[in-house]
Amino acid sequence: MSRTTDELLSAGDRRNSPSYAPARMILDHGEGVRLYDREGNEYLDFVAGIAVNCLGYNHPRLTEAICSQAERLLHVSNLFYTAEQIDLMDALCERSFADRVFFCNSGAEANEAAMKLARRYQKVVAGKPEKFQIVTMKKSFHGRTMGAITATGQPKYHAGFEPMLPGFDYAEFNNLESVAAKVGEQTAAVVVEPVQGEGGIRPAEPAFLEGLRELCDEHGALLIFDEVQTGVGRTGTLFAYQGYGVTPDIICLAKALGGGTPIGAMMATEQVFEGWTKGSHASTFGGNPLVCRAALTVLEEIDDQELLANARERGDQLRRGLVALAERFPVILDVRGRGLMVGAECGEAARDIYLECRNQGLLINTAGGDTLRFVPPLIITEDDVEEALSRLERALEVSQSE
Ligand SMILES: *Cc1c(COP(=O)(O)O)cnc(C)c1O
């Protein structure tokens, strides 16, 4: 190794986009649910690249799939088909309500595609050009492109980038009356995360999603679920909508779909996709054979290793452990989540606790500023969860004594 860790960190800080503030370590490799930095320190990873690395690190089957695919084809563009792309579209549609898939590279792009499709559907298929309004939720997060920050119902993501795009309105999450007051003849779509992620790990109440479905049907609006974080097993069903029993018209995926390779997807029914014709939308990299092969491997591993059941069981274990810790550490104000998407609200102390977790060899992050977020790989074991809880306990002891 040519440069020391300190030399690398200071070079990084000179060159990196100032919009980031990475931790003071340089990660080197990972194995299973553990990460190692260049100094040889070991970390139990409960952040998983922000809910991305669902199969952990150096997963034998995923690594083999990516390496063998790289020997055959990396990219061909959407001028051509590959078997990997077609197999993945089939696999996603067979496992969901959707009939067709649009591939892209990130969550923000999936949401952009969804909002473009919804507006075109209203104009072209429903014949209602007046229906262009998109209603989203306060405390939501939908990504960082101009459309996606406009959809994001948090002023801090808009600050300095105004004007936002026209045709958006914001309602209160888990408050059906608030949404009903915004939805009408002008509404093209309602966008919601079944569990708000960045906003603080807040699950929708089942009656709220059921009510949104009825409201959208009543007004001819499309219901879009942003499942960029909740999708692909995170909440204990392959898609969170299946756990709620409420089917959207459009679903957006990214994060965990490629097991760490960058792939996003926007899926909908045949009827909704009638809004698009040749040339309506495109992505150069979208659905290339490398990322499709990785995503297929992820879906196969979720089935073969029963990772949905694991997400439910390990999630219950983690929540039970957090509730027990909350009895001893009153700084934990609330424990929330579904499956392996778990939050522990800690108020202003959240940041200190999360930094101390790192000292104790546990990687997590925060959501909504006041909530510790736990989104480990779906392959996590019972022992891993116990180990994470005891490292968290030590972190809580240290922050309490300070
Ligand atoms: C992370 C996230 C996004 C943005 O995804 P990017 O890949 O960063 O563009 C959008 N929606 C939700 C719900 C997310 O959690």
Image (spheres, rainbow, N blue to C red):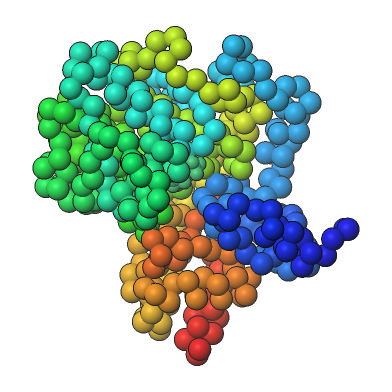
Asked which quadrant contains residue 5, the reply is bottom right
Most extreme residue toward the right, as rendered? 2
Q: Where is residue 78 in the image (x, y as percent from the top left)?
A: 57, 16
Q: Position of residue 105 (x, y in %)?
A: 54, 33
Asked if residue 273 is positioned above or below residue 290 in the image, the reply reads above
Residue 311 is at least partly visible in this image: yes
Nearest to the observer: residue 67 or residue 122: 122
Question: Residue at the location (38% across, 36% down)?
Answer: 147
Most extreme residue toward the bottom, as rendered? 401
Asked which quadrant contains residue 143, the reply is top left
Question: Residue at the location (41% across, 65% down)?
Answer: 369
Residue 304 is at least partly visible in this image: no
Asked if residue 104 is positioned above or below residue 27 in the image, the reply reads above
Question: Residue at the location (34% across, 29% down)?
Answer: 115
Nearest to the observer: residue 22 or residue 385: 22
Q: Where is residue 57 in the image (x, y as percent from the top left)?
A: 67, 50
Nearest to the observer: residue 354 or residue 379: 354
- Tell me how many marks there are: 0
Relative to 3, 377 lies left or right: left
Question: Residue at the location (25% across, 33% down)?
Answer: 167
Asked if residue 230 is positioned above or below residue 277 in the image, the reply reads below
Specify the quadrant that holds the N terminus. bottom right
Q: Where ligand 1 lies, by quadrant?
A: top left
Relative to 311, 296 lies left or right: right
Asked if residue 325 is positioned above or below residue 52 in the image, the reply reads below
Q: Position of residue 140 (x, y in %)?
A: 33, 49
